[in-house]
DNA sequence: ATAATTCACATACATCTCGTATATAAAATA
DNA sequence: TATTTTATATACGAGATGTATGTGAATTAT
């Protein structure tokens, strides 16, 4: 036990200095994640060298292994970051729509378009599942899926959608959207096939409506 | 130029001996592919050692690099083989259904169930896309997708399905099915979630019907 | 039938990569 | 001011891939 003055003194010092240490550490983490996003997107996970990665931001693998444990840990951190960005972006797209149903369709279209980004595609859609396993079991819990599932749950509760399993519906919708994006991105003229993909997606999703239009 | 007797003699010899050479070569190829299926499924593509692979069937990497060029080439051959098996299996499942539409649904359900096989999942769904890229650009051209697309085309021509882009619809359906399977397989009780996935798939696919039922 | 040539596969090597074990220097604590 | 943490760097060891070269059997040609 210690008296108040001693504690406050310690707290102050600790507050300052720990902050400084934690600050640079956070900076280094951010640097590494940022560099990893570029390298993983460009070379692919397997071909990305950790030496190149770290030296690109003035560090060595020492920092990497201390912060992320191993190469997989770094990928997990990167995937987590991108996935969060995607989820909030999709949520935003959905919120701008007229009603919840249009919101779901907008979310789907947003996923398709986001997946055209090479960074998203390579890291989240291709290497992510291969290295980290099924998205639903990622550390990040796949925010993308959660957003879709929540929207689906609301639509089922409101009677707009057929009472199917929400998780199943979310997985199917996401799978369809992301797979379609892979196709669009690999096509010779993405501009012309993108609308076809979106149209087909909207038709497909319509199958989940309680009252077909 | 040479006379007939000479040619036939050569053809005979060639027929015999070349056959012997090609035979052992084909056997070795089959051995390697077979071993690779096991190793890739068990360890995953990245962690599978080519030395272990080859020595498991009494060969060395020399045979491997001569036959398949590199590790990727071997994976491509394995994927091709499994994909073909899947396609014919799905086609068979579809053919047993009453009409074309039920056939499409049966194909989808078949894909979902096949994807529960760890070999299919790990090799075709996870490592395949990550290492070889988008399935539509695989050497094998992804027979699975072609089967679905052809079914879709017939359904559109017959007026059963909405006139969406056949390729797009096939991609979406396949993506939904295979993604759902990933979810089912990763779940704690596949037996209970599988029917949910199939039910949701059928509902979703219903969105492509020209006249909703 | 024999000599020459192919070629399928094996062996040896060079390079790269990851992960760990150890070292160090700055920072936090006492 | 001395001591202890700890975030990062350095050094090292264990594979793995791909290539370059060797070799012996199989095939062709004379």
Image (cartoon, coloured by chain):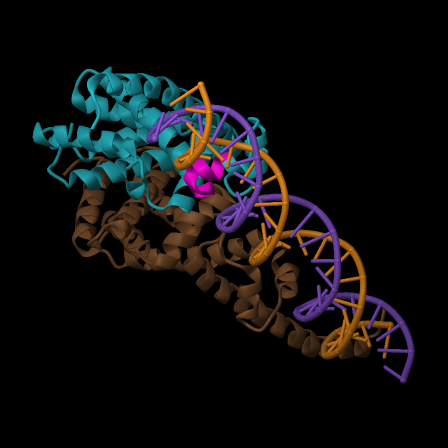
Chain colours: A brown, B cyan, C orange, D purple
Front position in the image: A98 or B130: B130
Q: Is residue B44 above or below residue B16?
A: below
Tell me where residue C11 appears, x and y as whole percent. Answer: 62, 39
Tell me where residue B57 appears, x and y as whole percent. Answer: 55, 26
B167 drawn magenta = no
Q: Quadrant of residue B11?
A: top left
Tell me where residue B109 appears, x and y as whole percent. Answer: 32, 25
Is B153 placed left or right of B125 in the picture? left
Front position in the image: A99 or B119: B119
Is B7 placed left or right of B209 in the picture? right
Q: Which residues are magenta?
A: B63-73
Q: Quadrant of the N terminus of chain A?
A: bottom right
Tell me where residue B76 appears, x and y as whole percent. Answer: 39, 38
Q: Is residue A36 above or below residue A3?
A: above
Q: Is residue B183 visible?
A: no
Q: Is residue A75 above or below residue B80?
A: below
Q: Quadrant of residue B159?
A: top left
Q: Is residue B110 above or below residue A156?
A: above
Instruction: Report the residue at 58% width, 28% height from top.
Output: B56
């Amino acid at each position: 036990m210690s008296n108040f003055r001693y504690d406050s003194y310690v707290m102050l010092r600790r507050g300052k200095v720990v902050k400084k240490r934690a600050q640079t550490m956070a900076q280094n983490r951010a640097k590494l994640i940022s560099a990893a996003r570029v390298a993983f997107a460009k070379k692919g996970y397997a071909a990305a060298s950790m030496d190149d990665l770290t030296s690109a931001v003035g560090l060595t693998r020492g920092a990497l292994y201390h912060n992320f444990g191993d190469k997989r840990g770094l990928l997990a951190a990167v995937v987590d970051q991108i996935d969060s960005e995607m989820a909030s972006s999709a949520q935003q797209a959905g919120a701008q729509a007229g009603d919840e149903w249009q919101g779901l369709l907008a979310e789907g279209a947003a996923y398709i378009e986001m997946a055209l980004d090479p960074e998203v595609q390579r890291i989240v859609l291709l290497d992510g599942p291969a290295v980290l396993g099924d998205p639903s079991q990622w550390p990040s819990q796949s925010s993308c899926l959660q957003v879709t599932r929540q929207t689906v749950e609301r639509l089922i509760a409101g009677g707009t959608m057929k009472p199917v399993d929400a998780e199943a519906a979310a997985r199917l919708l996401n799978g369809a959207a992301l797979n379609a994006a892979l196709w669009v991105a690999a096509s010779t003229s993405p501009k012309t096939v993108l609308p076809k993909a979106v149209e087909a997606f909207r038709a497909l999703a319509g199958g989940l409506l309680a009252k077909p239009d």
